[in-house]
Image: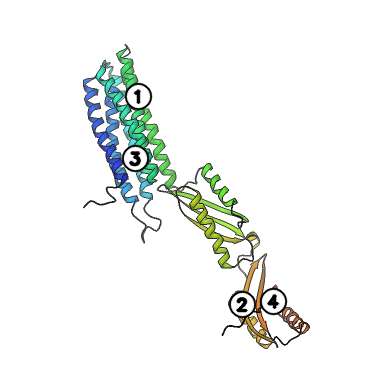
Amino acid sequence: MSNPSTMGPGFKVTLVGAGSNLFLSLIKFIGGILGNSTAMIADAFHSLSDLLTDGVVLLTHKIGQIPKDEDHPYGHGRAETIGATVVGSIIILAGFGLGYEVWKTIESGLEKIPNWIAAFIAGLSILIKEGLFHYTRIAGEQLKSPSIVANAWHHRSDAVSSIAALIGVVGALNGHPIMDPLAGGVVAVIIIKFGYDIAAGGVRDLMDTALSEEKTREIHEVLKSIPQVIRYHDLRARGIGGEVLMDVHVQVKNDLTVSEGHTIAETVRRKLIKTLDNVQDVLVHIDPEDDDLIVPVYSTDREALKKLIGPLLSETENITEMTKMQLHFFRGRNIVDLFIRMDQNQTTEERDRTLQHLKKRLESEKQIDEINFYLDINQKRK
């Protein structure tokens, strides 16, 4: 029984390309020798290098599809990026090798006159390679595979080099024999340029280079469309194997509960993933709206305040229970909201005097800058 991951769409499209490259490299070598064309032989070496890159693509794409695990919590997508970089590097080396061979041919002064066989094979290669480019590119974009997309552009570079070879052959057939080796040189330059573009893109991803201006602008538009987000900052995004990982700090109102802040963060995360293409995950950090005014280390915490406030509440007549305490740390101040129950037999005046006295007493403590009392009128839980 075949392995599903091995026989997936990525494997099939690369296998079609490998078969085509094997066929083209053979007929180009034969056509170059029988047709006396240096440019065609150079183009045959280009197709042969495609076979090697097909193998790299098959391996890295298969690795990239492995689900995340304990050792690779972000998945194995970097293998795809490495594959694209290797493909680009191989293309560059092939281009320099071809350039050297073409230079030796020109230096030797050999001016062979190609024939119609070389022209026919160059035209056939153009048609096959251009078809492979579109077929592979569409599959790579659907699979979100950088290595397969890189391989598609490798097919396109082969098509362009075949055009150069055809021009050289036709020029030589029309009385300009030097055009054939010169076309071989053009093929080498084209190969190097395509290889550089592919490898540079892979290196940018490996270096966690920021997304394009257009993509970043789309992210800003999404964040601005969420009404609960007052401002945002420290937006960072990077590509991993065709997917995007992102993190951002969003500022919300100071008095929100933890659960409401979490709900806003989840809203931001889901909307970015749903709206933008290829976003794998988003880490959203919630900040209060004036977080630039927050003192990083405060002089107290919840446990210390409970130890301070608890005994005072117990000693205060007519306060029966503290049901909740909320803390706010901003603008360099410690603010406490206390939810309490009081004796219902008190008059309003008695209750106000009790709370004012307690407020004054607590705010005299250095750990508390402001305290607010709220009467809890919910029925007491049994």
Vertical order, 329 against 96 (above or below): below
Q: Assess whether mark 2 and mark 1 are in contact (beta carbons under 8 angstroms).
A: no
Front tag of 3 and 4:
4
Quadrant of residue 321 within the rendered picture: bottom right
Pointer 4 residue: 373
- Distance between the Cα atoms at labels 1 and 3? 22 Å
Front tag of 4 and 1:
4
- Distance between the Cα atoms at labels 3 and 2? 62 Å
Q: Assess whether mark 2 and mark 4 are in contact (beta carbons under 8 angstroms).
A: no
Callout 1 amino acid: Ile
Quadrant of residue 316 within the rendered picture: bottom right
Circle 4 SS class? strand
Pointer 2 residue: 324
Work out which residue is located at the far right of the displayed protein and give it: 349
* Residue 259, position as x, y percentages in the image: 56, 67
Pointer 1 residue: 163
* Residue 146, position as x, y percentages in the image: 39, 43
Circle 3 SS class? helix
Residue positioned 63% across, 72% down in the render: 327
Q: Answer with mark 4 or mark 2, whichever residue precedes in sequence.
A: 2
Pointer 3 residue: 87
- Distance between the Cα atoms at labels 4 and 2? 10 Å
Callout 3 amino acid: Val
Callout 2 amino acid: Lys
Would you call the spot at circle 1 few (<14 residues within 10 Å), some (14-19), or many (20 or more)? Answer: many
- Distance between the Cα atoms at labels 1 and 2? 78 Å
Q: Is residue 323 left or right of residue 273?
A: right
